Image (cartoon, rainbow, N blue to C red):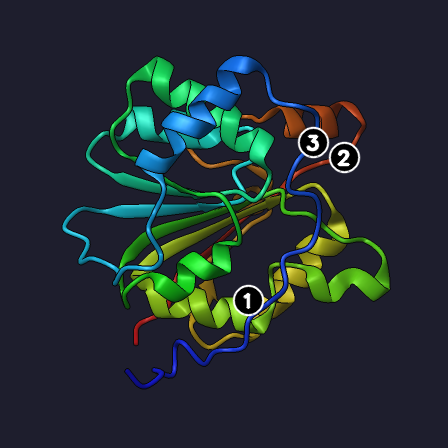
Amino acid sequence: MSETPRQRRPRTRLYGRSKGKALRKRQAALIEALLPRLSLDLSQPSPSFARETHLEIGFGGGEHLIAAAAENPQVDFIGCEPFINGVAKLLARIEERGLANVRLHQGDAADVLDWLPDDSLGRVYLFYPDPWPKRRHRKRRFVARDNLDRLARVMHTGAELRFATDIDDYAAWTLARLRAHPAFAWRAQRADDWRTPWPGWTRTKYEAKAMADGRHPVYLTFVRAPR
């Protein structure tokens, strides 16, 4: 089989840790038994998506993803997270809630974006990504032209990209790159549009810590423009 243009797309390198402290016995058991059942098989062709599908990139401890999936059983959710400890926490919550509308990828979200079919996502969440604050490391930020191109391909017209950060520089970086991309539009009209979280917002532990430290989150919403 010859390579498609999508398969030839340059790959980004995944930086940062993939594992922290040792997993507890139950967490290790969930990684062994439950994760394989919920994991996307990227070696197989991507299926057609019959239901509304949302993607969360870097779900951390899974607070937002688990709440969104529980509140919206009619929506299918895909969560991507390279950090195995975060995956283990989410698996425990999925098992406790008995959720059947979550699939996972323990690894780089760009791999999932390359695997997904065109026009398959109704919403994408990117909350508190690693800001890589050192100037020489900024090329590692997820918000980059190649990843925005990937998102543009898989998002429906009118689909939302929701982005949150407590780092002013990353907010400005993201706003500049999304506004420069022809596939996305920023619809904010007033300050409250980016100072106020979305309806039903679930505050994560990271956000609570950031606010306790005096950092103010920014909530940006971008809409996939018509093709």
What residue is shown at x 43% (from left), y 23% (from top)?
30
Q: Residues within 10 Å of mark 1 (few under 14, many from 20)?
A: many
Q: Which mark is residue 178?
A: 1
Question: With 206 as the anchor, is 100 left or right in this view?
Answer: left
**How far is mark 1 from mark 3, CA to CA?**
32 Å
Report the mark closest to the observer, 1 or 3.
3
Instruction: Decide if residue 52 is in sight here.
Output: yes
Q: Name which of mark 2 and mark 3 comes first in the sequence.
A: 3
Question: With 9 as the anchor, is 82 left or right in this view?
Answer: right
Determine contact: label 1, label 3, CB under 8 Å: no
**Disc 3, SS:** loop
What residue is shown at x 73% (from left), y 30% (from top)?
210
Q: Residues within 10 Å of mark 3 (few under 14, many from 20)?
A: few
Which of the 4 quarters of the picture holds residue 42?
bottom left
**Disc 2, SS:** loop
Amino acid type, callout 3: Gly
Q: Mark 3 highlights which residue?
A: 20
Q: Residues within 10 Å of mark 2 (few under 14, many from 20)?
A: some
Which of the 4 quarters of the picture holds residue 166?
top right
What residue is shown at x 63% (from left), y 57% (from top)?
14
Residue 28: x percent and y percent? 52, 22
Q: Mark 2 highlights which residue?
A: 215
**How far is mark 1 from mark 2, CA to CA?**
23 Å
Instruction: Decide if residue 201 is in sight here.
Output: no
